[in-house]
């Protein structure tokens, strides 16, 4: 009798364990949850730490309008972010994405900052078959091995600088370039693409150097730079310390090129250089041209309390949020496989521009030229405007 | 030839900056046998306070650097008083391990708290001076000023250690701690004072860092490791050793980086290994 | 002046002293004798505040000192000249002596004390700019005693001052100790050199395996058979 009882109990427990998760799925979800990690501490905090607020403000804006319409349930569902701090380290990102993968209420992943950490995060997405919209991640390594469960939003790193060359071509006045690159995959990729582009267009690269991230003494490079006498000096470094250190020492050496391009201009770089930052040319994932519908983007920035010029990567976030929203609306369901299919195949417009995914998984968002003018980072695109607004030093 | 001269100048100027903070680390090690892994954090804090005051007032950053000296001293003093002194009575091997753990923990903690309170982003003070040009050669007045200050501090500290009673007590404690106790030196207080002085030197180096380069809350351990190498190279506990060690490191980095920036740091470490193979106690070690 | 009451001292689990009792009165010379490992150095290190007793009390001038830090005890005028000398090897002889007058009371009398020390050890004046680490053993012992005197001791504790010295020098050191005593300084002398110590002492204690085995007037102890057999080899 006793034994029968326990066998019964066991069978019952097993039944609950097997059917249980399906039972919860059968109920309509109350909200759409997006899981992500962001560098809220560690070395990338200064670049992306504020984007937690940005995401929440975006969700707030959409929810004010009722949320995202999901056809399968015939109603709008509110959206919610679940965000963890990866402290700028891949092992933390992996840990938190693994943790979120066990939560069935999370229908989506958004990627972390930088290719290096995204590499860890996409592995988790692929393993558990959870759709991941990546954000700031566009290096070749990420796209070399196939993974169906992640798509990017950015063009390849190699193409990031492509909109700069036409300005110099049309405007004239500079011929020779020098590049100083911090030794990371991303920085090297961006400069490689840029240099090829320059050569194709008849410009000359007279000096090119790759230096390790901790470099503090740039004098040896600057000595060579002064010998090579380029018109344009380009600095591409993910770490602001590298950029600031180099520029301060170039100022000390009294070398005054006609043009300085900095790949990652942030508020902190501008502040640290003061007036010397004036007329430094850079790039942002946004331009304020009138072809675009940027109302929502500017609204969430306003609510978050910063400008796109202070955090030049904020455009990437807005694109990723919007892609997630559109994918759900297009798919009409929260089914993970169907959403992933949609993310791959969807061709839409974001802020009036084309958004799609290449067969490798790259996106379509590139960077637009900007310049520090009056202590602020201002947009100088489209091309005609750029030629007029852009100043040499 | 000009290039060679220019590289040597750059190397010596950079080395002087290394030497300044290494000096403090060496002093602390000499007196209390503690490798203070939080030393880089004191450097970072010096730079941070300079940055904050500069942002608020726009005063000359070096003036600010001098103004915050008493505060830096106080910080070092209480760091020793409350974190290191309780360990002083422990057995030798326990003390060694626990001082490493405590200073490492403090380093991580200071870094995180700073990052939380002041933001993790890179901070730099915008202050520049013209450079001095002589044909193709140039020397930055800023770095020259740094060198003059470093030289001044070296002479000052030398004088302090030789002539004042506290300075002598500090040397006495380094050379024979029990002997110092037997003549009535309060060695615990001397230790705290030494931490204060070390923290002051680190904070001045931090001011140069924030002016010449930039600082961030997570830089501490990286610079501490560099300073550890310098004082090992120069001989643990030797002041002149840390000066020479700093300049050797700066020169090596400068010259090798000219040929290939990637080998600059590696070459510096190779030199360290080489010197330790020839002189296991460092250049000026006893 | 100094009263030691039943101190028990441990190194970890190992007990080195078992209820040691002793006194030194002002202007006295008292010897603390005993074989190697008897606990003599342990006793005086406890007096000087390097080791804390687990039980018992130590009074100096009627104040409790066994809870004070070493430097505070020095301030009271209780000075040890240690067996290992503990000089500052990278300082000159002069600097070592000056360090002896580190505390305020002694600092004011620096010039006088210097004359006193140079009077006792004229050779130190000649060597005053030599680094202490490069001195001979005997010279180092003189610097150690000199440095102790610079602190203006009221009670001077000497731990085996004759150790490793040539017989000529040993005699000189014992003479100096007597001279110091004549200036009014009380002396606690730890020695292996039992015969000579007892000859200059007023009283003496014999330490065996961490406890006092015998005590009395020095002249009396010199005559006891036990001392004569075990320590004087007569
Ligand atoms: N730091 C220590 N740790 C453990 N045991 C110790 C320590 N110092 C001394 N001892 C032990 O305590 C006992 C007494 O030592 P102490 O040095 O007091 O002897 P002593 O009478 O001064 O001898 P000596 O004439 O050789 O100097 C010895 O057995 C010694 O081994
Ligand atoms: Mg002994």
Image (cartoon, helix red, strand yellow):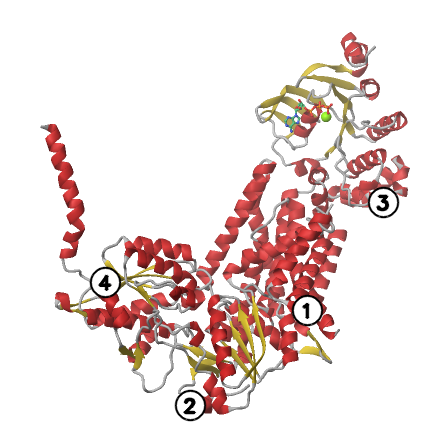
Q: Quadrant of the N terminus of chain B?
A: bottom right
x and y, in percent, of residue B134 in the image:
74, 79
| Residues beneath discs 4 and 1 located on the same chain | no
Q: Of the residues tagged 4 and 3, which is closer to the observer?
A: 4
Q: CA distance from mark 4 to mark 1?
A: 59 Å
What residue is shown at x 30% (from left), y 75% (from top)?
A: A356
x and y, in percent, of residue B36 in the image:
59, 50
What residue is shown at x 68% (from left), y 29% (from top)?
A: C45
Q: CA distance from mark 3 to mark 1?
A: 40 Å
Q: Residues within 10 Å of mark 4 (few under 14, many from 20)?
A: some
Q: Is mark 2 within 8 Å of ligand 1?
A: no
Report if the CB atoms under discs 3 and 1 are less than 8 Å apart: no
> Quarter for ligand 2?
top right
Q: Chain of mark 1?
A: B
Q: Above or below — where is C152 with respect to B127?
A: above
| Residues beneath discs 4 and 3 located on the same chain | no
Q: CA distance from mark 4 to mark 3?
A: 86 Å
Q: CA distance from mark 1 to mark 2?
A: 42 Å
Q: Which residue is mark 1?
A: B10
In depth, the one of A43 and A354 nearer the eye is A354
Q: Which residue is mark 3?
A: C130
Q: Residues within 10 Å of mark 2 (few under 14, many from 20)?
A: few
x and y, in percent, of residue B63 in the image:
62, 69
What residue is shown at x 51% (from left), y 50% (from top)?
A: B106
Q: Which residue is mark 2?
A: A385
Q: Which residue is mark 4?
A: A337
Q: Is residue A306 left or right of residue A259?
A: left
């Amino acid at each position: 009798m006793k034994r029968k009882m326990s066998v019964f109990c066991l069978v019952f427990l097993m039944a609950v364990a097997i059917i249980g998760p399906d039972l919860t799925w059968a109920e309509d979800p109350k909200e759409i949850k997006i899981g992500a990690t962001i560098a809220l501490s560690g070395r990338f905090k200064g670049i992306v730490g504020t984007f937690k607020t940005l995401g929440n403000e975006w969700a707030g804006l959409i929810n004010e309008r009722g949320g995202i319409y999901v056809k399968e349930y015939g109603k709008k569902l509110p959206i919610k972010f679940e965000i963890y701090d990866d402290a700028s380290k891949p092992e933390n990102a992996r840990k938190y994405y693994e943790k979120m993968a066990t939560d069935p209420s999370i229908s989506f992943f958004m990627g972390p900052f930088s290719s290096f950490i995204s590499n860890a995060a996409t592995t988790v997405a692929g393993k558990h078959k959870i759709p991941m919209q990546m954000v700031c991640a566009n290096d070749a390594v990420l796209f070399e091995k196939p993974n169906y469960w992640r798509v990017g939003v950015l063009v390849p790193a190699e193409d990031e600088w492509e909109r700069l060359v036409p300005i110099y071509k049309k405007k004239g006045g500079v011929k020779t370039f020098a590049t100083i690159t911090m030794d990371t995959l991303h920085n090297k990729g961006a400069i490689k693409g840029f240099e090829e582009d320059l050569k194709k267009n008849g410009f000359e690269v007279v000096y090119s150097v790759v230096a390790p991230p901790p470099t503090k003494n740039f004098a040896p490079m600057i000595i060579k730079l002064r010998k090579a006498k380029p018109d344009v000096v380009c600095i591409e470094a993910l770490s602001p310390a590298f950029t600031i250190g180099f520029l301060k020492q170039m100022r000390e050496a009294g070398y005054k090129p006609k043009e300085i391009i900095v790949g990652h201009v942030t508020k902190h770089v501008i502040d640290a250089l003061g007036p010397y930052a004036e007329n430094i040319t850079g790039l942002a994932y946004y331009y304020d041209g009138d072809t675009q519908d940027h109302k929502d983007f500017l609204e969430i920035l306003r609510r978050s309390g910063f400008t796109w010029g202070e955090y030049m990567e904020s455009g990437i976030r807005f694109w990723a949020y919007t892609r997630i929203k559109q994918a759900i609306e297009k798919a009409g369901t929260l089914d993970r496989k169907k959403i992933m299919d949609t993310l791959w195949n969807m061709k839409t417009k974001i802020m009036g521009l084309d958004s799609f995914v290449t067969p490798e998984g790259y996106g379509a968002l590139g960077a637009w030229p900007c310049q520090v003018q009056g202590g602020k980072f201002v947009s100088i695109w489209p091309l005609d405007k750029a030629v007029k607004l852009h100043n040499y030093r | 030839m000009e290039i060679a001269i220019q590289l040597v100048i750059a190397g010596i100027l950079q080395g002087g900056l290394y030497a300044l903070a290494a000096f403090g680390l060496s002093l602390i090690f000499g007196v209390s046998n503690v490798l203070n892994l939080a030393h880089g954090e004191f450097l970072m804090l010096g730079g941070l306070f300079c940055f904050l005051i500069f942002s608020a007032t726009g005063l000359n950053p070096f003036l600010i650097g001098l103004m915050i000296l008493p505060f830096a001293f106080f910080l070092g003093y209480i760091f020793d008083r409350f974190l290191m002194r309780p360990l002083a009575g422990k057995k030798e091997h326990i003390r060694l391990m626990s001082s490493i753990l405590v200073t490492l923990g403090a380093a991580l903690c200071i870094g995180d708290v700073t990052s939380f309170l002041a933001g993790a982003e890179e901070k730099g003070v915008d202050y520049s001076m013209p450079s001095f040009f002589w044909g193709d050669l140039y020397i930055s007045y800023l770095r020259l000023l740094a060198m003059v200050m470093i030289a001044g501090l070296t002479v000052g500290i030398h004088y302090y250690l030789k002539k004042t009673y506290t300075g002598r007590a500090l040397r006495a404690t380094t050379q024979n701690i029990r002997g110092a106790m037997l003549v009535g030196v309060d060695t615990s207080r001397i230790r705290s004072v030494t931490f204060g002085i070390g923290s002051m030197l680190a904070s001045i180096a931090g001011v140069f860092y924030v002016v010449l380069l930039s600082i961030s809350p997570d830089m501490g351990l990286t610079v501490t490791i560099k300073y550890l190498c310098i004082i090992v190279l120069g001989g643990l506990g030797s002041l002149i050793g840390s000066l020479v060690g700093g300049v050797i490191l700066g020169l090596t980095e400068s010259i090798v980086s000219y040929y290939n920036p990637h080998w600059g740091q590696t070459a510096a470490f190779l030199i360290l290994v080489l010197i330790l193979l020839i002189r296991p106690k460092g250049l000026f070690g006893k | 002046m100094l009263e030691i009451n039943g101190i028990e001292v441990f190194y970890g689990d190992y007990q080195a002293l078992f209820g040691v009792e002793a006194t030194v009165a002002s202007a006295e010379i008292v010897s603390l004798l005993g074989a190697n490992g008897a606990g003599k150095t342990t006793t005086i290190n406890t007096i000087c505040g390097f080791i804390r007793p687990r039980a018992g009390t130590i009074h100096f001038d009627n104040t409790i000192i066994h809870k004070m830090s070493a430097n505070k005890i020095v301030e009271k005028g209780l000075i040890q000249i240690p067996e290992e000398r503990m000089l500052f090897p990278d300082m000159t002889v002069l600097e070592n002596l000056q360090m002896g007058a580190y505390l305020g009371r002694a600092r004011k009398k620096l010039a006088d004390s210097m004359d006193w020390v140079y009077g006792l050890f004229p050779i130190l004046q000649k060597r005053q700019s030599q680094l202490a680490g490069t001195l001979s053993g005997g010279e180092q012992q003189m610097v150690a005693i000199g440095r102790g005197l610079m602190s203006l001791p009221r009670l001077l504790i000497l731990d085996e001052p004759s150790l490793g010295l040539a017989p000529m020098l040993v005699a000189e050191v014992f003479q100096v100790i007597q001279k110091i005593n004549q200036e009014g300084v009380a002396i606690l002398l730890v020695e292996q050199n039992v015969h000579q110590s007892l000859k200059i002492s007023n009283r003496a204690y014999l330490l065996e395996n961490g406890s006092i085995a015998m005590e009395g007037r020095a002249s009396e102890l010199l005559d006891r058979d036990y001392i004569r057999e075990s320590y004087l080899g007569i």
